[in-house]
Amino acid sequence: AWAQATTGTVTGRVTDTKNEGIPGVTVVIEGTQLGSSTDVDGNYTISNVPAGGRVLVISFVGYTTVRQQIAVGEGKTLTVPAQALSESATQLGEAVVVGYGTQRRQDLTGAVEQISSKSFVKGQVTNPEQLVQGKVAGVQITDAGGAPGAATQILIRGGSSLSASNAPLIIIDGVPVDNTGISGATNPLSLINPNDIESITVLKDASSTAIYGVRASNGVILVTTKRGVIGDKVQVTASTQQSVATVAKYSNVLNADQFRSLVNTYGTTGQRAVLGTANTDWQREIYRPAYSADNNVSVSGAAGNLPYRASVGYLSQQGLLKRNDLTRYTGSLSLTPVLFKGSLRVALNLKGSWVDNNFSNQGAVGAATSFDPTQPVRSTASQYSVFGGYYESLNPDGSLNTLAVRNPVALYDLRRDRSTVKRSIGNLTLDYKIPFVPGLSANVNVGYDVQRGRGTTFIPANAADSYVRNGQNNFYSQDLNNYLLEAYGKYERTLGPGRLEFLAGYSYQKFENRSYVFDDRRADGSIYNPVALSYSGQSTYLNTNVLIGFYSRLNYNIADKYLFTGTFRADGTSRFAPGRQFGYFPSGAFAWRLKGEEFLKNSSAISDLKLRLGYGQTGQQDLGGSYYPFLANLSLSNLTAQYQLGNTFYRTLRADQYNPNITWETTTTYNVGLDYGFLGGRLYGSVDFYKRDTKDLLNFVQVAALQGLSNYGNFNVGSLTNKGVEIVTNLDVVKTDKLSITVNANATYNQNRITKLTNSDSPNDIGQLTGGISGGVGNTIQVNSVGYSAQSFYVYQQAYDTNGKPLEGVYVDRNGDGTINSSDRYRYKSARPNWILGGGANATYKGFNLAFTLRANLGNYVYNNVRASSFYDASTNNFLVNRNREVLSSGFTSAQYFSDYFVENASFLRMQNATLGYNFGELLKKGTNLGLSVAVQNVFVITNYKGIDPEIFSGGANPTIGIDQTIYPRPRTFTVGLNLGF
Amino acid sequence: AGLTALSTGCTKDLDQVPDYSANAEVVYSDPAQIQQVLARLYATYAVSGQQGPSGQADISGIDEGFSNYIRVYWQLQEITTDEAVLGWNDGNLPSINTMTWNADNEFVRATYDRIYYQIGLCNEFIRQTTDANLASRGITGATATTVKQYRSEARLLRAMSYWHIVDLFGGGPFATEADVLGTLPQYKTRAEIFAYVESELKALDGTDASNGGLLAPKAVYARADQAVCWTLLTKLYLNAQVYTGTPRYTDAVTYANKVLAANYQLCTTPSAQFSAYQKLFLADNNTSEARNEIIFPIAFDGTRTRGYGGMTYLVHGAVGGTLSPATIGINSGWGGFRARQQFTALLTNNTTSTSDARRSILYTSGQRLNVDTLTAFRNGYLLPKYKNVTSTGVKGSDAAGDFPDTDFPMFRLADVKLMYAEAVLRGGTGGTAGTALDQVNEVRRRSGSANLSAVALNDILDERARELYWEGHRRTDLIRFGRYTTGYNWALKGGVNSGRDVDATRALFPIPNTDIVANPNLQGKQNPGY
């Protein structure tokens, strides 16, 4: 220790540019272990500082670090002039949200990308994931079509699983949310108001995700909502967006005259007899211009040490399909007080939403492309009066033809399909700096995510689609409850040549999924099928998943040059049998900040250079609906699957397939990344190479006969690899007070390969057939095979005549055995893109702002099921099915579903959004702000794909990618927005 | 160590179990629930999962509706023969019609998987109900005898499914209740499985009902009783020459005699709407006189036993064209099965009367006799034999007209009569030629055709076709008479319109590649030709 006389005390204050004190800022004397952090007013005191010339280093995440020369006098107190920190102009100092904390961007060792509100996609954005669509390298976001609240697939680095979920873990303000989806809402994220979101961070490699062990294999998305800041004055922001959406492209089906001519050429006598005389364009009948309003008001500020933000939102969104709309009310409250002189930081976040869905009948979308265009919407003929006067296909005896396509307009006119879904997410976080032990803090986080889905389906007795059962009057109901308790301790100190941060914690999360069952009723309320009570005699079915984790992380930073991170998590899940519940997931990363080295320190050309190396293992246990795959149980049959012995009907008990040995799927990720900044920070970005090996895939696979209790089961079998490159570039083209232009671009190459699928490597194994199509029953067009990408198309090779016209039913005998059978099918391309590109530009000139976002996928193929169904079918019984115009060129008269002729290159370039805004500034009154913007979503798509949209994801219970069975059209939306702040 | 202590303390909540299902310990301690498990073994023939009509599927890898036992079994037995074609665009279904299937065919695989699924369920039931297990779960005395009776039925159902393996696939993987679940079964040859089925059936036949043996014939509707066991033995022995190379016709006669001596009668009384023969295939065939002829029905019910296989498939699949679905008691036809012209000729040839009730079922309006195009429903006559209306013409219980009440006659007396005649004609002792002729003529007379004055072996094959068409016997019969792969051709056989001989190895289906991949013990055990 130094003698008393040789030291002095340093005191001072740190403020922001508005001269408000910043609490929690780290202030250290360089080259010593002496330091302090600022109190709630931004004041600090460091005693026992050796006298003499010293350098004071003041740093805080999100702000530029300041180094200040001071001279400390013996036995004196030096009062350093107040130091104002400016928010970091470069990306490097930006606070990046990571697992259990934040880090300066320059300290990151993993592949982490954060998009903050100013970079979000603008215009009409109604779901959170749309904010970053096309913005993040390695992240593919595809919605299931243009319906409000449509399901979305988020795939990070190609996904690591086959049968198990490929969805990333989504954490909103520290609460891992339930992504299982709830009855009544097709997209659980649509329950979050994107206007409340401050930033979205994507953790991509294992060194950043492994701290979430169990659920991290498919990446982690951290959503941080907006909150108030100490020192802010009351700020009220009100915004409104008014939009109109239009159909961008219609499906290319035959018009009435073309169809009449086709039927007269190919049809049977019976088919010609049912041709009508009308000219109906069914697609134009069912769609409409759709109007939407999105209104939001927020209040934020700070009352002393209590920063707050509250917001309310109202979204009223129409779908293009008539009678389809969504109304969403949202509210959020955030209180983030700092107590006990900054030693206790409290964060209370509450979010609530109430969504009313009116689904209409989305079956009308497909029906409109196949219903006979020569028939009218309505008919006054007497035989149709029982169907509400809508034209329907009848049998010759006058009864309803139940196999025919139903009248698309009647489908939605005679159906009321509504749901109300409520969701609340909330948590309370306490972060307490333990007194007397410098550097030690404790953090407790309790949270919940509850959802209630309720819905009704009413179909009147005269609706043709439920005519045989006299309509429907049904309820459904589901509750999701998710409780969270997390606690961790953190210890920071200087140790040896560097600074150490150690964190260790415990996490408990319980997911309860309760569905209710009801009588199946006719329109008049009478019971059509009575409810089946469960084995325990209840009308509810409860599934529970508990996850318990122990985690730790060590960061060691030597001179801001050498950065080490190690994490370890032990995770337990209730999905596996006792003894197999825990998985262990380590990771390690090293980053070398070359910019910190002497030879680059003063380089103005190179503003940043950092090499990152990462390794880690993550797990996957999410088998979707399979909650107890290890359990040897018998399940009780429903009332409609009873069996009669003697004069009694028995509800049967079936011994279900189980696998007592089932356990974790493990993904090992290797990541090499380079962060760069050139031209004084004007050109910056990163390049990452990754390889992700998943083994012990949680795979729903064929089981040997008599080995188990069914022919398929969940087993840890198989492995796959994703390899790829991600490139991110940002360029500040011009940056002056009046004019600024920034350009950003990202590119991802991903190669997905299945490396093992079965325990015995048999040459007989063609793989797992997947990708159900429409046409026939149970037909599939894709295969997962060893050596190929998942979802490769599995097709016959079409033979063509000399004019290039496909020969009907003639395929290449690829194995040369003289017969064409399924042994001649081959693997041709995949639904997965090779390249995913995104980019955009943002230009500001005085008050004007112009921004656009572009997205492209290259090398993705789509099976055009609409074209494949376009053969002239002479076998339909007394009804007609309209066809895509393909039938005119191919002239097929029988189904050729498995021809590669229908697998199309669906590479595309889409302008996702273009926005022009003008900021009037203090036009109304001093201290106010007024902005006006106009935007277009889905401006254009450039593609050779022949369907209405090249981006195809089906959503639903068994989602498929790259199989186009007609999609609810993605609209082209025009938006006017007004923003008022005061 | 600290972490371990903490983890055991905090992790009890990881042990979650649902309350909507129960484990074996609970279920097998309660005789009523054991009966529900037994019912499930029977239900495997009728349903495809626990939800009805679809959902919670028993097996995967194929559309659930396609996977039903009766459906897959019937399909391989009928549409590979002259009796039927099915022209749907479902995967590799067309190649079943044309005898060009391969070892990746999903319909062959579904049949195999479904049969083994049933064997697996039976094994598990027998495993759980051993005497030792019953005693340890407190089931004793008369209750234990009842449960042992269930166990005998499970053994009979398992023997039936192993017989299906022998008949369709030859050899295959083999396991019993003695094998531990989770282990890979070994391969057994056709002769070995045949011997096992024979020994099981004979053991069951030798056990008295009071000691947990099978129920007496007709004791309880739809239960597998002694008569089912005897019928199965008759079938096994009648085909033993094919299965093992050793004829067993005398044994066939022995067990046919046992069935004939039981209290079954041909249904001979027509109703106002339907012939006596037609009554066997109607919605009330579980309560009408048909019940006296049906030895082993698979019970269906329009409201309580629903699925897209079984009778739903057989009734809807036969309807299309100008045939009105309403007259069949359903809401729609699926436009599926038609007869090939060679079979139609058998039905209409000069040994049958034009008013023969079996022949009268042919529906020709709007249909062509010849099958030239597989997918064209108008090619081939229709045979709406199974109907969802009762003998008094009332539609079945499902108001929507989707799911029939009609039960499937797996075994019935007329079949046994014809088997008896055939076994005698093939040299089996224990019967006479005169009785054989009588049995054949009884069957013919019931449908309104004249008595034959003499019966030769080949007459039996044709009579079986006329009497038992679309009941799932034809492939086995043609093989036994040496007419399946060669010696008799029909439209589209081998993929050509006039039909052609196919390789003799087509008399067995291939073991699906998927199982050879999943079970290394099957490497090198594929049937010849695949």
Image (cartoon, coloured by chain):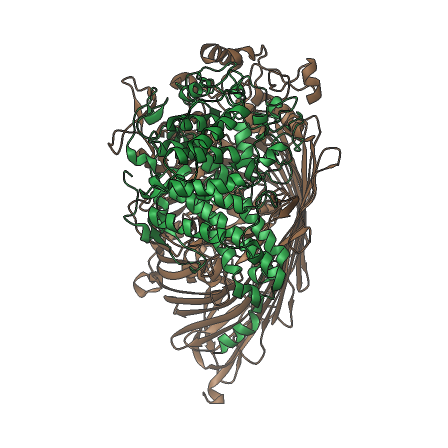
Q: Quadrant of the N terminus of chain A?
A: bottom left
Please give the name of the residue rendered at 47% of the width and 49% of the height, measured from the top-left corner.
Answer: B158
**Most extreme residue toward the left, as rendered?**
A816
Residue B123: percent from left, percent from top: 47, 54
Front-most of A183 and B141? B141
- Number of marks: 0
| Residue positioned 41% across, 67% down in the render | A566
- Pick the residue in front: A613 or B391: B391
Looking at the image, residue B6 sits to the left or right of residue B143; the answer is left
Residue B143 in view here: yes
A909 or B196: nearer the eye? B196
Left or right of residue B11: residue B252:
left
Instruction: Name the side, left or right, on which B115 lies relative to A526.
Output: left
Residue B106, placed above or below residue A797: below
Corner quadrant of residue A500: bottom left
Q: Position of residue B383 (x, y in %)?
A: 51, 23
- Give the colour of chain A: brown
The quarter of the displayed image where residue A53 is located: bottom left
Q: Would you say residue A886 is visible in this rendering?
A: no
Q: Say above or below: A240 vs A678.
A: above
Occupied quadrant, residue A336: bottom right
Residue A65: % across, % down: 46, 64
Q: Colour of chain B?
A: green
Residue A75, position as x, y percentages in the image: 51, 85
Q: Is residue B31 above or below residue A139?
A: below
